[in-house]
Image (spheres, helix red, strand yellow):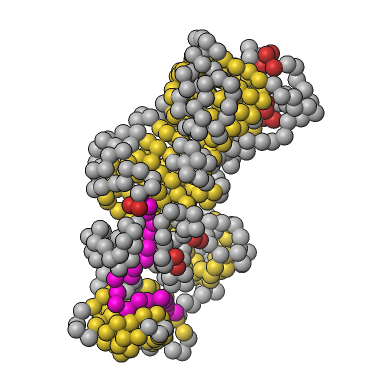
Amino acid sequence: MMLLFALYTLVGSRSYGQCPPTSVSITGGPVTIPSGGIVAVIASSFSVGPGAHLTIDGNYTAFVDTVFIDPSAIIDGSGVFHIASRRQSGASDGCPARPTYIDGNGAKVDVLIRNENPNNLVLADLTKGATPTNGQATLYLGKGLDFGTTSLNIFGVSTPVDNNDVILNNYDVRFDNDALTSNYTASRFFVTNGTGHVGKESLQTFIFPVGRAEGDYTPASINASAATSDFFVNVNDYATSASNEQSPSEGIDRTWNIYASNASASATVNLQHNLSTNGGNYTNENAFVTRYIGTAPNTAGGATSQSLWDYTGNCSAGSATGTLVTGSAIIGASELTRAFTTFATNAASNDANYTKSRCDNSPMPVRLAQFRGQWVAGKGNQLTWLTYQEQNNDHFEIQSGSDARALETVGRVAGKGTTTMAQVYEFVDAQPQNELTYYRLKQVDTDGTFTYSSIIAVRRNIEVSNGLMVYPNPVIDELKLQLTSKQTPDEVRIYSLNGGQLVHQTMNAKSISAGNLPVGNYIIEVKTKEGEILRQSFVKY
């Protein structure tokens, strides 16, 4: 299929080995691309100028370096506005692979935009000599934005596209109340590398496919009780967030900045992060979403917190995979939700900042720096914990059980009273009753008040099976399974060494993807159709 050259002829003939500066502008109007029509423009700069009205009911592809939309321009239609680089046109081989910069100036683009540039679509404040709104490069979407998976050049040749992010810098992408986004994955999403936010008007339910950098996908979803507010989302790491993450080892090194147009909006926030960003003391199996308050102590979360962040008093396990994506769930990612009845109304408010914390960020008079457990051959399940502050600490009770919801006391260790010196404690469960045992500390003061730690899990005496071989080991991406007996795999699970389940997959294939797992040591467990359970250890590089 050959594309029409209605606008291509304005920018000259085909030029191999060259990349001349050229420009195309649409002024006045209306200019209409009818349904079924296919039009392409190839230029270094493309602008829809003052008073212009461009209606796209067919397919309009801009193979360009820059797109400028005047604040007074109208772009609408039922078709698709494709944006790609000049090099992708098939007629500008001399042009280097480069991003397309776009200045939306807040004008509503009421036609679907499809980003097809693998070198990204980048929001920028451009000056084109028309009537730009300086400092305002908001891309306002009336129909939505699709992350294209293929790009069609002017000769009808289709090529696959990936890594086609939208880079926000310090500008916003704003979705109308009925505008949508699609085909976002861990390799193509909105990158909030500056102060820019992704916004959604009159939100009811919406997934914000955001990440702080390319390849670092940490989305959020918001489910509101009523469509009475606009919401805006940005994500950064601890170093660049405006909030003060006092104990980074107890969190996940990502902070979401979320605000709403209606302070009394009621909504559930779901945050998805990658396990590779977990702090050394973060426990995915027992955590909560926390909001920054900026003062301590505070009771903003419903329970008293001695930190600058609120505490809910209610904790839960994060999900085993990340599902805020189109396509397959992401292994090595985890979601956690919390309901809120109030929201900040600007990005600068303290309470616009959200992250996740392990549960023992509650106000313990004894501050735990570490609580860990491991199976030691010939000894049992060995628990160790470290405190860096104690006040009136009488003792610790060690609680355990096969069910994290029903733990019983199995031991006791005396505390150190009051001290500001670091203290190391140890307890050995010499005869754990179950293969997988959960443990929790109950710290008791001299006056009888007590506080619980987070819950950890220890898997006893992991025995590998001669009936299961895995290779390559260490593995980088695909882990192949080989059963030495004539059995068929039915279910496969992958566990961390502390017992946390990371992957559960029903399958009868001979391999499983391990590419999204963080670097470390793991146990793979295969249940066969014949009912046998086989285990093997492996290392992920």
The image shows a total of numbered marks equal to: 0
Please say whether residue 164 is visible from this viewpoint.
Answer: yes
What is the quadrant of the C terminus in the image? bottom right
What is the quadrant of the N terminus in the image? top right
Part of the protein shown in magenta: 352-374
Say left or right for 504 vs 204.
Answer: right
Q: In the rendered view, would you say 517 is above or below 25?
A: below
Q: Nearer the viewer, residue 534 or 90?
A: 90
Q: Can you tell which quarter of the image residue 163 is in?
A: top right
Magenta segment's dominant SS is strand
* Residue 369: in magenta span: yes
Residue for point 78% across, 27% down: 18
Residue for point 51% across, 75% down: 464
Residue 330 rendering spot, x and y as whole percentages: 47, 52
Q: Nearer the viewer, residue 290 or 5?
A: 290
Q: In the rendered view, would you say 92 is above or below 353?
A: above
Residue 410 rendering spot, x and y as whole percentages: 28, 85
* Residue 291: in magenta span: no
Residue for point 55% across, 34% down: 124
Residue 177 rendering spot, x and y as whole percentages: 35, 30
Say left or right for 118 vs 332.
Answer: right
Residue for point 54% across, 17% down: 49
Residue 175 rendering spot, x and y as whole percentages: 40, 32
Q: In the rendered view, would you say 272 is above or below 142?
A: below
Please say whether residue 460 is visible from this viewpoint.
Answer: no
